[in-house]
Image: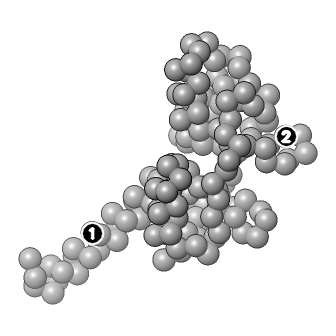
Amino acid sequence: MHIKTILSKKGQNVISVPPDTSVHAVAELFKKERIGFALVRNGHQTTVGSISERDIILAFAERRDLSELPVADIMSTDIVTCDIDDTIDGVRDLMTERRTRHVVVKDGYAFVGIASIGDIVKHCLKKCNGNIGNIRDYGVE
Protein backbone atom coordinates (compact mmCIF):
# COMPACT_ATOMS: atom_id res chain seq x y z
CA MET A 1 0.00 0.00 0.00
CA HIS A 2 1.21 3.53 -0.77
CA ILE A 3 1.43 6.71 1.31
CA LYS A 4 -1.12 8.34 -1.00
CA THR A 5 -3.68 5.99 0.59
CA ILE A 6 -3.12 7.67 3.95
CA LEU A 7 -3.31 11.14 2.41
CA SER A 8 -6.55 10.27 0.62
CA LYS A 9 -8.13 9.59 4.04
CA LYS A 10 -6.58 12.36 6.14
CA GLY A 11 -6.35 15.05 3.48
CA GLN A 12 -3.50 16.86 1.87
CA ASN A 13 -3.37 19.91 4.11
CA VAL A 14 0.14 21.29 4.57
CA ILE A 15 0.28 23.96 7.27
CA SER A 16 3.09 26.48 7.12
CA VAL A 17 4.25 29.52 9.06
CA PRO A 18 6.60 32.41 8.23
CA PRO A 19 10.11 32.27 9.77
CA ASP A 20 9.43 35.28 12.00
CA THR A 21 6.45 33.62 13.72
CA SER A 22 7.02 33.36 17.45
CA VAL A 23 7.46 29.93 18.99
CA HIS A 24 4.53 30.75 21.27
CA ALA A 25 2.29 31.46 18.27
CA VAL A 26 3.33 28.15 16.70
CA ALA A 27 2.56 26.29 19.93
CA GLU A 28 -0.90 27.89 19.93
CA LEU A 29 -1.36 26.85 16.28
CA PHE A 30 -0.33 23.28 17.12
CA LYS A 31 -2.87 23.19 19.95
CA LYS A 32 -5.68 24.69 17.87
CA GLU A 33 -5.10 22.45 14.83
CA ARG A 34 -4.17 19.38 16.92
CA ILE A 35 -0.92 18.94 15.01
CA GLY A 36 2.75 18.75 15.89
CA PHE A 37 4.50 19.89 12.73
CA ALA A 38 4.49 22.75 10.22
CA LEU A 39 6.65 23.85 7.34
CA VAL A 40 8.42 27.19 7.58
CA ARG A 41 8.03 29.23 4.38
CA ASN A 42 9.40 32.67 3.61
CA GLY A 43 7.54 35.55 1.92
CA HIS A 44 8.12 33.97 -1.50
CA GLN A 45 6.49 30.73 -0.26
CA THR A 46 9.85 28.97 -0.49
CA THR A 47 10.19 26.28 2.16
CA VAL A 48 13.17 27.12 4.37
CA GLY A 49 12.64 24.59 7.16
CA SER A 50 10.19 22.91 9.46
CA ILE A 51 9.14 23.28 13.07
CA SER A 52 7.96 20.43 15.27
CA GLU A 53 6.99 19.79 18.86
CA ARG A 54 10.40 18.19 19.30
CA ASP A 55 12.16 21.37 18.11
CA ILE A 56 10.20 23.38 20.66
CA ILE A 57 10.99 20.98 23.51
CA LEU A 58 14.70 20.95 22.67
CA ALA A 59 14.74 24.75 22.60
CA PHE A 60 12.84 24.91 25.88
CA ALA A 61 15.48 22.70 27.49
CA GLU A 62 18.13 25.26 26.49
CA ARG A 63 16.26 28.47 27.31
CA ARG A 64 13.12 28.91 29.30
CA ASP A 65 11.53 31.93 27.60
CA LEU A 66 10.53 31.04 24.05
CA SER A 67 7.51 33.32 23.82
CA GLU A 68 8.97 35.88 21.42
CA LEU A 69 11.70 33.71 19.88
CA PRO A 70 11.15 33.36 16.10
CA VAL A 71 10.82 29.82 14.77
CA ALA A 72 13.70 30.57 12.38
CA ASP A 73 16.00 30.35 15.42
CA ILE A 74 15.00 26.78 16.29
CA MET A 75 13.59 25.24 13.09
CA SER A 76 15.06 22.21 11.39
CA THR A 77 16.47 22.76 7.92
CA ASP A 78 16.87 19.08 7.08
CA ILE A 79 13.34 18.22 5.95
CA VAL A 80 12.63 14.51 5.54
CA THR A 81 10.53 13.85 2.44
CA CYS A 82 9.04 10.94 0.59
CA ASP A 83 7.25 10.53 -2.72
CA ILE A 84 3.48 10.16 -2.89
CA ASP A 85 3.97 6.76 -4.54
CA ASP A 86 6.30 5.42 -1.82
CA THR A 87 5.02 2.48 0.18
CA ILE A 88 3.79 2.92 3.73
CA ASP A 89 6.35 0.35 4.88
CA GLY A 90 9.10 2.33 3.16
CA VAL A 91 8.00 5.57 4.82
CA ARG A 92 7.84 3.81 8.21
CA ASP A 93 11.41 2.58 7.69
CA LEU A 94 12.50 6.09 6.64
CA MET A 95 10.98 7.54 9.83
CA THR A 96 12.80 4.96 11.91
CA GLU A 97 16.11 5.50 10.12
CA ARG A 98 15.94 9.30 10.26
CA ARG A 99 14.42 9.37 13.79
CA THR A 100 11.56 11.63 12.78
CA ARG A 101 7.85 11.66 13.52
CA HIS A 102 6.86 13.56 10.38
CA VAL A 103 7.63 13.14 6.69
CA VAL A 104 6.65 15.68 4.05
CA VAL A 105 5.02 13.97 1.08
CA LYS A 106 5.98 15.24 -2.37
CA ASP A 107 4.31 14.84 -5.74
CA GLY A 108 7.02 15.90 -8.13
CA TYR A 109 8.36 19.14 -6.66
CA ALA A 110 5.18 20.07 -4.78
CA PHE A 111 4.62 19.30 -1.10
CA VAL A 112 1.18 17.66 -0.99
CA GLY A 113 0.85 16.41 2.57
CA ILE A 114 2.36 15.37 5.85
CA ALA A 115 2.58 11.77 7.05
CA SER A 116 2.97 11.41 10.79
CA ILE A 117 4.06 8.42 12.83
CA GLY A 118 0.49 8.37 14.17
CA ASP A 119 -0.84 7.98 10.62
CA ILE A 120 1.53 5.06 10.01
CA VAL A 121 0.69 3.34 13.31
CA LYS A 122 -3.06 3.77 12.69
CA HIS A 123 -2.68 2.14 9.27
CA CYS A 124 -0.56 -0.72 10.64
CA LEU A 125 -3.02 -1.41 13.47
CA LYS A 126 -5.91 -1.51 11.04
CA LYS A 127 -3.97 -3.92 8.84
CA CYS A 128 -3.04 -6.14 11.83
CA ASN A 129 -6.62 -6.19 13.10
CA GLY A 130 -7.78 -7.19 9.62
CA ASN A 131 -5.24 -10.01 9.55
CA ILE A 132 -6.39 -11.23 12.98
CA GLY A 133 -9.98 -11.22 11.76
CA ASN A 134 -9.01 -13.22 8.69
CA ILE A 135 -7.18 -15.78 10.85
CA ARG A 136 -10.20 -16.12 13.14
CA ASP A 137 -12.51 -16.50 10.13
CA TYR A 138 -10.24 -19.24 8.84
CA GLY A 139 -10.59 -21.03 12.18
CA VAL A 140 -7.01 -20.76 13.42
CA GLU A 141 -6.35 -19.31 16.87
Q: In what element is the residue under mark 2? A: loop
Residue at position x 55%, y 69% in the image:
3
Residue at position x 78%, y 33% in the image:
19
Mark 1 = which residue?
A: 129
Instruction: Tell me if I can see residue 73 in this picture.
Output: yes
Which of the labelled discs sits on residue 83, or is there none? none
Taking the view exactly as shown, the residue that stands out farthest to the top is 65
The first of marks 1 and 2 along the sequence is 2
Instruction: Tell me if I can see residue 5 in this picture.
Output: no
43 or 78: which is nearer to us?
A: 78
Local packing at callout 2 (Cα closer than 10 Å; few below 14, some 14-19, many 20+) is some
Q: Is residue 16 above or below residue 26?
A: below
Q: In what element is the residue under mark 1? A: helix
Asked if residue 104 lies left or right of residue 44, the reply is left
Residue at position x 59%, y 24% in the image:
59
How far is mark 1 from mark 2, CA to CA? 43 Å
Tell whether label 2 touches label 1 (CB within 8 Å): no
Q: Is residue 76 above or below residue 24?
A: below
**Which dot, 1 or 2, sits closer to the camera?**
2
Q: Is residue 21 above or below residue 92?
A: above
Q: Is residue 92 above or below residue 118?
A: below
- Type of residue at label 1? Asn
Asked if residue 97 lies left or right of residue 114, the reply is left
Q: Quadrant of the C terminus?
A: bottom left
Residue at position x 52%, y 20% in the image:
61
x, y percent for residue 117: 47, 53
Local packing at callout 1 (Cα closer than 10 Å; few below 14, some 14-19, many 20+) is few
Asked if residue 33 lies left or right of residue 44, the reply is left
Mark 2 = which residue?
A: 42
- Type of residue at label 2? Asn
Q: Place residue 81 in its image quadrant.
A: bottom right
